[in-house]
Amino acid sequence: MNRIIEITVTKDGQTRVETKGFVGSDCQAASRFLENALGQRQGETLKPAFYQPETLHQQTKTGT
């Protein structure tokens, strides 16, 4: 799945940053620079993907 950071700006100037395709705390790390640039955070809603464990990729050797 692609990783997307979506920014919504309302008519009254409020912004919302939403991440898609991230697992665990990767979403917070990826969007931190935007949150810092946009100013003080009003709130945060964590999606179920935040609580999913990050997948560890293991490389295995087949023997010779």
Image (spheres, rainbow, N blue to C red):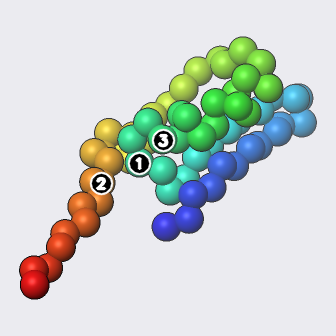
Q: Do the residues labelled 1 and 3 touch (CB within 8 Å)?
A: yes
Disc 3 marks which amino acid?
Asp
Disc 1 marks which amino acid?
Val
Residue 49 percent across, percent down from the top left: 38, 47
SS at mark 1 in the image:
loop
Residue 10 percent across, percent down from the top left: 83, 37
SS at mark 2 in the image:
loop
**CA distance for labels 3 and 2:** 12 Å
Mark sitting earlier along the chain (3/2): 3
**CA distance for labels 2 and 1:** 9 Å
In terms of image quadrants, where is residue 47?
top left
Q: How crowded is mark 3: few (under 14 residues within 10 Å), some or many (20 or more)?
A: some
Q: Name the residue under label 3.
A: 26
Residue 63 percent across, percent down from the top left: 10, 80
Q: Nearer the viewer, residue 13 or 27?
A: 27
Q: Mark 1 points at which residue?
A: 23
Query: Which residue: 24% across, 61% down?
Result: 58
The single residue placed furthest to the bottom in the displayed view is: 64
The numbered disc on residue 49 is none
- On-image quarter of the C terminus: bottom left
Residue 60 percent across, percent down from the top left: 19, 69
Query: Which residue: 50% across, 31% down?
Result: 45
The numbered disc on residue 55 is 2
Query: Which residue: 52% across, 41% down?
Result: 27
Q: Do the residues labelled 2 and 1 touch (CB within 8 Å)?
A: yes
**CA distance for labels 1 and 3:** 6 Å
Query: Between tags 2 and 1, which lies in front?
Result: 2
